[in-house]
Amino acid sequence: MAPPTLDLANLPDADVARLAQQGREPAFRELVRRYERPVFSLVFRMVRDTATAEDLAQDTFIKVLNHIDKYRSEFKFSSWLFKIANNVAIDHLRRRQLDTISMDGSPNASTAADIEATRFDIADKSESALDEMEAKELGSEIERAIGALRPEYRSCIMLRHVEGRSYEEIAATLDLPLGTVKTYIHRARHQLREALEHLRE
Amino acid sequence: MQHRHLLPNEIDLLLDGEVGFGVAPLRAHVDDCAECRARLDEARVVADALERLPHFVPRSGFADRVMAQVQVVEPWHVAALATARRFVPESRPLRALALAGAGLASVVISASAVWLAFSADLGFKSASFIATRARGAMVDAAGHLFETAFGSGAADAVRTNGSMALAVGVVALVAAVGAAAFGFRALATASRQRGS
């Protein structure tokens, strides 16, 4: 009798991870499909370089999927994944001492594709031309301001506002005390407000 | 209502949409204080802009590049289950038939195992009975042989004194055989000397 076919796209993460633990290759692919963009975005905003971010995002998935048997379903799969992605990015920054981030985006962007990848684009939002222009300007300014934050502030603010995680989840993901997470996010917001103050004037 | 401006962490509480008993006075203050309202709006603009940041897309074929370096391992119990599943028929009547067959086979196997265990026990008991009887017969035969060879007196002495008398008898026999052998050898040597 053939094994039952599953609609993986509609299953929760924990179920897909369980199927991956059973050695089902489509489940591995589904996990990559779900999280390739969030993980790549988080890592890219940490390291500010497309090629490096892709390598690190790839390393993250390889580590996670090769150790899928270690995953326990009482924890959120995405928290485990983001924890590893963040550790991979922080390790890279420590090795390369890239804490000083270029305000113009990727320091290694040499091709048009790389430059394009670092650009902020919200063209799919239905806004007036003026709003769109302002939003685009704010978007690229905010990307630069994020790049100037300390790496630990960066990962906290990304998880909070881009991935919509709660403070508790961020604390669990980054192995930080809850109070520290709140402080980091508060400071990051303050720095971002200061960095974007000139836009309001 | 609060009579002072909000602290930065209180602005954060409102920004995060916290609810609860302690947040209500903060909201009331913001409704009445233009300065705090402006600070909250300013914080909200940044938070909204952050929330609208897009996800970046890696180059196409990202999943394939990842999967090329991932080892998909099927645990043994899953593999065993999958193998067993291959033998299960597709249609319901055939599955029922297969289930009945499997049930019958398990009954037959269980019964055979019980029978084998019982037979083994029976065999063991028979073998030990035969061994006991054979040992008794051999001891009787040895007794008769001993009596024939050494006479009924020696046999009675062995029966009366047990193994000690048997040991003394055996030593005496060995000594007698040894002495006889020595005597024959001396006679043969003497006759060879006389002949030469």
Image (cartoon, coloured by chain):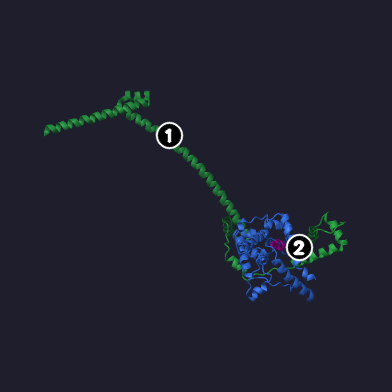
Identify the colour of chain A in the image: blue
Which label sits on residue B194?
none
User: Does any portion of residue B51 appear in the rendered image?
Assistant: no
The part of the chain drawn in magenta is A153-158
Q: What element carries label 1?
A: helix
Say how many tags the image has.
2
* Residue that label 1 marks: B132
State the image quarter where residue B41 is shown.
bottom right
What kind of secondary structure does the magenta stretch mostly adopt? helix
Chain that bears disc 1 = B
**Which of A131 and B95 lies nearest the eye of the viewer?**
A131
Asked whether disc 2 touches disc 1, contact meaning CB atoms under 8 Å apart, the reply is no
- The outermost residue toward the left is B196
State whether residue A159 is above or below residue B60.
Answer: above
Identify the colour of chain B in the image: green
**Which of A123 and B136 lies nearest the eye of the viewer?**
A123
